[in-house]
Image (cartoon, rainbow, N blue to C red):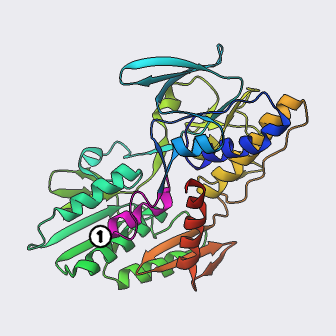
Amino acid sequence: MGCGFGGVEVASELSELRKRSKELDITMIDRRTRLEYQAAHPEILSGKVTAEKISGDLNEFAARINAEFVNEAVVNIDFEAKKVKTEDKGEGREIPYDFLVISIGAEQTFFGIPGAEERSYSVNTLKGAIETKNALDKLDYSKKINIAVIGAGLTGVEVAGELVDYFNFRDRASAKIYLVELMQRVLPAFPTEAVSNYAAKIISDSGVEILTDTAVQEVSEHKITFTDGTELPYDVIIWTAGIKPNSLIEKLDIPKEKGWLKVDQYLRVEGMKNVFAVGDTAYFESGGIRSGQNVEEAERQGKLAAENIIRTIEGKKLKRYRAKNTIQNPRAFISLGNDKAVMYFSGMMFKVLAYRVKKFVERRYMRRFK
């Protein structure tokens, strides 16, 4: 269920492992027809990539690994009957399973702030990134333009950098970019201030105005009101401030932690022997260390979940999961616009060639859909 990075990895690994279990059918279910390389969505704004370049056809991928692809939305799961309930254009059906992997990702959250969801754009999905780019293209640049990016985590910082490139390519000096962050520094999830300071300097030197320790109270038709009473007029808002569990998860009466599916050391949903969860939708913690919600962890979890499904079929001892890219010690490539990036790894920063390495990783991953 869910064919993002985690789900695709599960299916791909099961395809490799199926020689150990001959009677194995793989069904991939997703309401989308294409995998979206989410890390590259900000570059849709600057025009450095196209939608086709950073997405892959799931029908073709499934055919290549001898799996069935079901292009329908999951609306519920009957865990007792072992059936996934789907719907497409008003018509529903039930898909039986012996083992289920839930990998349906996360959704953008607006924290209940009045007007935020209705008046903001997003790059959380490929469709959203394209809509945001179209909104930028339609602005009247004969007058002063204000673009507000709400949330200065990894995605927000990358969006700000790509906006700089968007306007540099078009020589539209009348546009002003604001990067708004609730916490006291950009990239607050990273444990060291060095990467925050470096990123802040690069994007502020490019003309982005950074507003830290600033909380949005309300979004009205033409202005943002902050909790300190100040206001900011805007033409486009791009919301990058946080994620929440997929809305389907709220329906499911199974163990959760902070809204995410709580999994055991083998990535099974706690208390369930044949249901696994991987990627952003899973809450994995061991020894006080929590797995991060990122591509690297989704892929690693996908591989292990597939291995443990085969081991369960074979009656073998399951393998324990060990997180690497964690909440406590994250690692990431962070694009900063103008073909610059910084790689953060084990508390260290690497600046030279970071952008080239990031793009190499992207191209290498997308090859599996060619």
User: Relative to 197, is 147 on the left or the right?
Assistant: left
Instruction: Read off the magenta span.
Output: 36-54
Asked where in the image residue 43 lies, by quadrant, the reply is bottom left
User: Relative to 62, is 56 on the left or the right?
Assistant: left
Which residue is more in the foreground, 262 or 34? 34
Which residue is more in the foreground, 181 or 133? 133
Q: Residue 80: x and y, percent?
A: 66, 14
Does the magenta portion include 50? yes
Instruction: Identify residue for label 1.
Output: 178
Q: Residue 161: x and y, percent?
A: 38, 74
In the depicted structure, whether residue 138 falls above or below residue 21:
below
Tell me the amino acid under the disc marked 1. Tyr
Residue at left offset 55%, top offset 78%? 356
Residue at left offset 36%, top offset 20%? 90
In the depicted structure, whether residue 38 falls above or below residue 48:
above
Does the magenta portion include 44? yes
Which residue is more in the foreground, 11 or 328? 11
For the N terminus, the quadrant is top right
Q: Residue 332: x and y, percent?
A: 59, 67
Q: Is mark 1 on a helix, strand or loop?
A: strand
Q: Residue 54: x and y, percent?
A: 46, 59
